[in-house]
């Protein structure tokens, strides 16, 4: 029987992390072979602590550089995606034009920080972490985040899309991938009515229709649905 060669790129983490899924989507869109190797970031083995200075997932290993130790490893999804773009330039997932490039990096950062804090710490964790501990989900906290923290963030995204299909440079980029995977962190545990943000709603649906976005999300969904069969209505 033929076996697939071992891919050079290993993403350490879990598809439950939006930042792991962001890197996986970038690899899929570029057709770059990769694998996701499970690491529990809340009880990490020593070898992982050694390569993750911020104690976070994901960390990338490029086995073509080194198979162990710090050499050949890169922490942080943004650094990882920049590395993969340089190593596998086609198809380009960062705009070439300077202003569009700057906008793409800003939207990536905005999604990684503001959106991820509101959606991850405000909604995903109070629901899912509670359920995995056998506690009742903190729906009051999640509802407050949905009602008060997310709308100003969605307003920024809606305004910067300004009706376009993509966030930067009229083409799919790291900005679209990141926004989609971080928004999907909310969708793992809650309904996502985006009626007040039509361009963002269209963008979200179009991104989810892509197998390179939906595939990593399905891997997370399979894990979440075991503990939480259905999603909550936060309205
Ligand atoms: N800016 C980092 C964020 C990574 C991050 O926050 N990962 C979370 C999982 S989604 C984590 O590892 N958290 C561990 C912790 O909070 O202790 C990136 O883009 O990679």
Image (cartoon, helix red, strand yellow):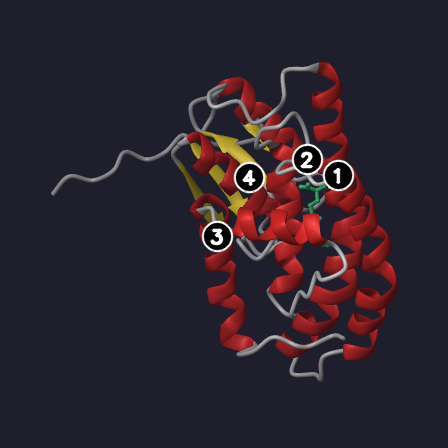
Residue 193, image quadrant:
bottom right
Could you tell which of marks 2 and 1 lies nearer the N-terminus? 1
Tag 2–tag 1 contact (CB < 8 Å)? no
Q: Quadrant of residue 129?
A: bottom right
View extreme (left): residue: 1
Percent position of residue 229, x then y:
53, 79
For image coordinates 62% across by 33% down, the residue present is 174
Q: Upstream in the sequence, badge 4 or badge 2?
A: 4
> Could you tell me which secondary element the residue under label 2 belongs to?
loop
Q: Under 8 Å from ligand 1: the CB of mark 2? A: no
- Which of disc 3 and disc 1 is earlier in sequence? 1
- Location of the N terminus (image quadrant): top left
The tag earlier along the polypeptide, 3 or 4, is 4
Residue at 68% from the left image edge and 35% from the top image edge: 167
Residue 204 higher or lower than 105, as above or below? below
Q: CA distance from mark 3 to mark 4?
A: 13 Å
Quadrant (top left/top right/bottom left/bottom right) for the C terminus: bottom right
Q: Nearer the viewer, mark 3 or mark 2?
A: 2
Q: Which mark is residue 162?
A: 1
Of tags 4 and 2, the one toward the viewer is 2
Residue under pointer 2:
167
* Residue 23 image label: 4
Q: CA distance from mark 2 to mark 1?
A: 9 Å
Q: Residue furthest top?
A: 97
Q: Is residue 142 above or below residue 174?
A: below
x then y, percent, for residue 110: 78, 41
Mark 4 element type: helix
């Amino acid at each position: 029987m033929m076996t697939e060669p071992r891919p050079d790129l290993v993403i350490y983490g879990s598809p439950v992390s939006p930042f792991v899924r962001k890197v996986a989507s970038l690899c899929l869109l570029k057709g770059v072979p990769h694998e996701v190797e499970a690491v529990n970031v809340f009880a990490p083995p020593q070898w992982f602590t050694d390569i993750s200075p911020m104690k976070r997932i994901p960390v990338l290993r490029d086995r073509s550089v080194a198979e162990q130790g710090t050499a050949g490893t890169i922490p942080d999804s943004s650094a990882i995606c920049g590395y993969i773009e340089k190593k596998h330039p086609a198809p380009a997932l960062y705009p070439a034009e300077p202003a569009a490039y700057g906008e793409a990096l800003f939207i990536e950062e905005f999604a990684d920080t503001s959106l991820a804090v509101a959606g991850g710490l405000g909604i995903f964790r109070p629901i899912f972490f509670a359920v995995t501990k056998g506690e009742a989900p903190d729906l009051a906290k999640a509802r407050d985040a949905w009602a008060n923290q997310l709308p100003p963030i969605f307003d920024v995204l809606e305004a910067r899309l300004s009706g376009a299909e993509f966030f930067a440079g009229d083409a799919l980029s790291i900005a679209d991938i990141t926004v989609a995977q971080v928004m999907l962190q909310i969708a793992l545990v809650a309904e996502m009515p985006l009626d007040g943000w039509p361009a963002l709603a269209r963008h979200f649906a179009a991104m989810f229709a892509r197998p390179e976005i939906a595939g990593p999300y399905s891997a997370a969904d399979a894990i979440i649905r075991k503990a939480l069969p259905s999603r909550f209505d936060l309205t």
